[in-house]
Image (cartoon, helix red, strand yellow):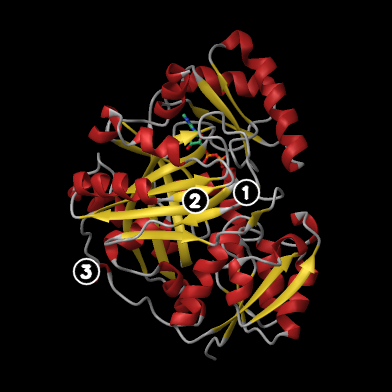
Amino acid sequence: MAISRILIANRGEIALRIHRAAHEMGIETVAVHSTADTDAMHVRLADAAVCIGPPPASESYLNTAAIISAAEITGCDAIHPGYGFLSENAQFADIVEAHDIAWIGPKPDHIRTMGDKVQAKKTAGALGLPLVPGSAGAVETMDEIRAVAEEIGYPVLVKAASGGGGRGMKVIPSPDSLENLVRQAKSEAKAAFGDDTMYLEKYLGNPRHIEFQVFGDGNGNAIHLGERDCSLQRRHQKVFEEAPSPVISAGERTRMGGVVAQAMAEMGYRGAGTIEFLWENGEFYFIEMNTRLQVEHPVTEMITGIDLVREQIRIADGKNLSCSQEDIAFAGHAIECRINAEDPFTFAPSPGKITYYHAAGGMHVRVDSGIYAGYSIPPYYDSMIAKLIVYGKTRERCIMRLRRALEEMVVEGVKTSIPLHEELIRQPDILEGNYTIKWLEEWLEKRG
Ligand code: ADP
């Protein structure tokens, strides 16, 4: 059965990204959208569009019944969930498959396992991935938590098993604040995820965030596409990503890539996935796995020449991986800047009407965005409106091209993070690749 019509269960730039890959494969697309997104670019470009509800995501982009109905009515034989929304909802994946619609994503059981961070760590450990030292599983009583904390040594991090977006996580610097902080983390987790299961980890002082892109065919074959460095973060949100990482050698990439690909092969993993590590003093420590396409996937595409969405669609269609590990060559350097509609330094959201827009262009410059002049950014969703991705033969040339591309980008009518990126890529530490997950917040504080 060949996929002929894909329902895109998402919005914004990623919806357009999926539409583009599909059309390049001769596959039709159906957009589903809320009433706030009637004028979105991907809705205009899709072969058909169905309005699935009012602006709040809970009534539209998370409305599984409306999405499945739209797929049935328009004769879709596959659903691509993008990232966020329903992309890591194992129950939705089950429902899609129960309707004989191809789920362009991992096996539902793998989504379920990796969505529970305690389970994910156990699975990763069993597959031979190096873990952050911590509790063997969930921790229950205060006495138990205290004992584990003593054993791994302060500072420790208490984390929610169902956590995400950095919520339900507290750093415990010393024994005297333990009880209070655990209580706070638990109540935060209960409120956000309805689950206050906790586990403990050693708190790493100053690591980098380095993640590996993996792909499996679901039948025991898997490859890795190298790493991305996503250490530039604010409140655990990535701001700027690059591939390869300035600190990972070709030898380390081959070694660690081999470890993660082997783990995915053993699992029988299907589709795209990302294995996230913290990296400190030359050591990798697994923190979590994301069972979906990532926002920052284009930097990997730029240095490997592989279209990751096309690959996802092929695998969902039962085809083999389009290449073997030996076919994959890493060439050059790529950087992505996330452009949000927000104040560049206070980060206050800035939705509204774009009065003028001019995208950067030229050799090796890619803009993934659904915005256009006259488009109104709705206030209901994520503030990211565009991704600027630039490639260069070397990191230096990539940065010079990025400067030039940022100069060309014009977005008027709303505030954007373009000025932040323009400053960032002039900082000596960034030019030298010398930064950790703490760098951006410390720099913002100093900047005032
Ligand atoms: P979430 O799913 O909430 O994003 P993660 O486990 O992916 O949680 O962690 C998010 C971020 O929190 C990491 O990128 C890193 O910046 C920080 N972090 C997580 N675990 C640790 C740790 N053990 N030590 C130091 N920082 C950590």
Q: Determine which residue is flagged by label 2.
A: 289
The furthest residue to the bottom: 1
Residue drawn at x 60%, y 63% is 109
Q: Which amino acid does label 3 sit on?
A: Glu
Q: Which amino acid does label 1 sit on?
A: Asp
The furthest residue to the top: 176
Q: CA separation, marks 3 and 1?
A: 38 Å
Which quarter of the rendered picture does the N terminus lie within?
A: bottom right
Q: How crowded is mark 2: few (under 14 residues within 10 Å), some or many (20 or more)?
A: many
Q: Quadrant of residue 107?
A: bottom right
Q: Determine which residue is flagged by label 3.
A: 326
In this rendering, would 156 be left or right of 438?
Answer: right
Q: With respect to residue 150, does 43 lie above or below?
A: below
Sequence-first disc among 3 and 1? 3
Q: Is mark 1 within 8 Å of ligand 1?
A: no
Residue drawn at x 67%, y 50% is 381
Sequence-first disc among 1 and 2? 2
Q: Determine which residue is flagged by label 1.
A: 382
Q: What residue type is labelled 2?
A: Met
Q: Residues within 10 Å of mark 3 (few under 14, many from 20)?
A: few
Residue 426 position, x and y percent, is 30, 33
